[in-house]
Amino acid sequence: MRYTAKQLKSFIKATFLASGASAEHAALASEALVAADLRGVDSHGVARLSGYIRLWQQQRLNMQPDIQITHETPSTAVVDGDLGAGLVVAQKAMNIAINKARNAGTGWVAVKNSNHFGIAGYHAMQALQHDMIGICMTNASPLVAPTFSKDRLLGTNPIAVAIPASQQPPFVMDMATTPAANGKLEVCERQNTPIPAGWAQTKEGQATTSNQALKNGGAMLPLGSDRQRGSHKGYCLGAWVDIFSAVLSGANYGPWVPPFVAFLPPLPQQVGEGIGHFVGAMRIDAFRPAEDFKAHMDNWIKTFRNAHSVNGEKVQIPGDQERTIEAERLQLGIPIHPQVLQDLKALSKELGIKAL
Amino acid sequence: MRYTAKQLKSFIKATFLASGASAEHAALASEALVAADLRGVDSHGVARLSGYIRLWQQQRLNMQPDIQITHETPSTAVVDGDLGAGLVVAQKAMNIAINKARNAGTGWVAVKNSNHFGIAGYHAMQALQHDMIGICMTNASPLVAPTFSKDRLLGTNPIAVAIPASQQPPFVMDMATTPAANGKLEVCERQNTPIPAGWAQTKEGQATTSNQALKNGGAMLPLGSDRQRGSHKGYCLGAWVDIFSAVLSGANYGPWVPPFVAFLPPLPQQVGEGIGHFVGAMRIDAFRPAEDFKAHMDNWIKTFRNAHSVNGEKVQIPGDQERTIEAERLQLGIPIHPQVLQDLKALSKELGIKAL
């Protein structure tokens, strides 16, 4: 079944409203979630909606958060998300970063006491319309083992950077700091196919292609996959995101990051509040005239896109793939997996709202 | 042969002075180069000294640069390195970033018209003594093919992040955005052993373990090695560094980045000036009290270091390995390869200075 973005947004808004969120917050949340569906990141869109509601039911997510700046300087702020949905909190934080950038050239906001925020790229892209570069990171519940560790200590901790161009579409990277997102392992499990080499390890820290690796106490591997191919660099990247998101802000880091799924409890003796994000905005003309910059970005993009490519393949610009999917889905609608649809149906019944 | 850091610094200073550099610049350059040797990054230390001199002899490096801010806001600046040695220019840029961070909370400096700056980690670490986080990136001459490209369009474009702790040593990541640095490929060539899988591709874009891959028109691969293991993410990282270092500043990017080796000419019709760097400094207490932050960093570091590890291995913190080597080399001296020694001997004769 396919649905229009508008249909999905209405449904998401209704669930948030029924859970006590304000109209403003419900709208913000629906925009962020549907952006993931439109861009083809199905694991981070409406498929997660019931997850947010379950957390709210357990009082691990606040639908009426009082989102506040707790500390600031001309170019920085710390935001307390009051345990709100990251979908909303991150957008508020990004707005603060953009406003700081207007005055100070750049703005950087570390966020504590938040929850899952959807896709990092959506938040980073908010800067583009202001001729700014947007940056966004978040930590996430621990699934990844650092190089040579048997323990899961890091999330898939994504980094997104959105950079405006002129005639060309913007450069938008949005990457987990692992070879593949967790959702791709779940697909292999559903289809009962082995996972590719380099994605996961066993409980004992040995390489594996078993799609049961995580269920059996194993872990995801950092980008690079093994020491020889540079997994210690993927570990560095994930660690960097964890520290900026949580140690700078006062959120939970490493093994203490609370799980998104409501059936797993957070670790006891939390070291901070909620999960953490780190967002930034940089005014292009704080460095050079925006027109100059964007003309060179056009040249950069064309140069890379026109590179000689391996037979049958294409050199893509970060963001190309998501844009292609978005154009298609805006036209044909967004396909929703039958299992997700069933889940949403149950949710609508439970909340007493109109089914999707 | 082993030499003390002091001996190497004196020799480097003498070469820079003999090439017309000021005493201040000669000292700055010697500190940055020897830091690489001390930390075990032999490819980026005194082994490169003659390379800087060759560039100067070709008037592609200015020993008396007038390093200037060309544009600024409270938290940003663009610096024109006047074609100076990156070793010096990057330190000046980092100082500007640190001063901006004092007032605005953070400081971000994009640098154009520079040259190779040694190791990124050294520059990032300058922030630590001020209770700041240091960040440093640079682009470099094209050796790396984006995913599915046959063409070399990116350098090994490193990212360094230095974060202070309290009782624990600082977190210092300093990583090329490729599985291995180019110097490691050269070691395989010298020893005539194959390179590990995942490091390089042939001219036609096929995976290879030939240590002649680059000589035969092939390319290094981005971190992730292949599409399935996430090489598109390594490509994103290298691209990000390229754009921040050069498109923000007005330096050369992509295939136009001038080569470090003087026997290769830069591409014609340059799109900017020299090579580019991007450095930043963030005051810890622009986010939360420095003592709180550093206490949590101690906890972060201990938690990760004490993870259960794969048999016979150790979970390291970014910076551990370099610190171990530095402690050893401070005690035993810095080993210099016979070939490098010969090169330095020839250099001292040529410049009329005392041999090492």
Image (cartoon, coloured by chain):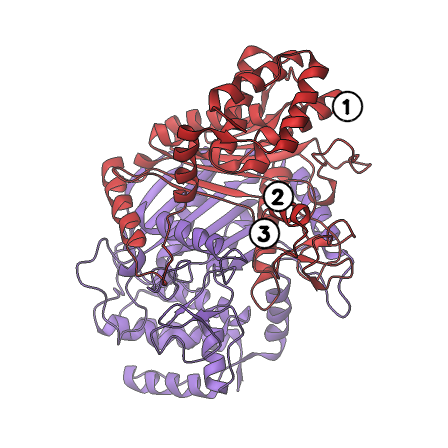
Chain colours: A purple, B red
Quadrant where the C terminus of chain B is found in the figure: top right
Question: To which chain does the residue with label 1 belong?
Answer: B
Does residue A151 appear left or right of residue A105 in this picture?
Answer: left
Question: Residue B327 is drawn in which quadrant?
Answer: top left
Marked residue nearer the N-terminal end (1 or 3): 1
In the image, A126 versus B320, the foreground residue is B320
How dense is the environment of label 1, judged by Cα within 10 Å: few (below 14), some, or many (20 and up)?
A: few
Which kind of residue does numbered mark 3 sit on? Thr
Is A111 rendered above or below residue B172? below
Residue B183 marker: 2
Q: Position of residue A285 (x, y in %)?
A: 58, 36
Tags 1 and 3 both on a single chain: yes
Tell which circle, 2 or 3, labels the residue nearer the N-terminal end.
3
- Above or below, A149 against A218 in this view is above
Nearer the camera: disc 1 or disc 2: 2
The quarter holding residue A260 reads: bottom left
Give whichever of A191, B337 is nearer the camera: B337
Residue B103 picture location, percent across and down: 38, 26
Q: Disc 2 marks which amino acid? A: Gly
Which kind of residue does numbered mark 1 sit on?
Gln
Mark 3 crowdedness (10 Å alpha carbons): few <14, some 14-19, many ≥20: many
In the rendering, at what x and y percent does residue A216 appear?
35, 78
Q: Chain of mark 3?
A: B
Tell me the SS state at disc 2. Answer: helix
Q: Specify the farthest residue to the left.
A: A269
Which circle, 2 or 3, is nearer the viewer?
A: 2
Q: What residue did someone put label 3 on?
A: B178
List the residue tagged with mark 1.
B58
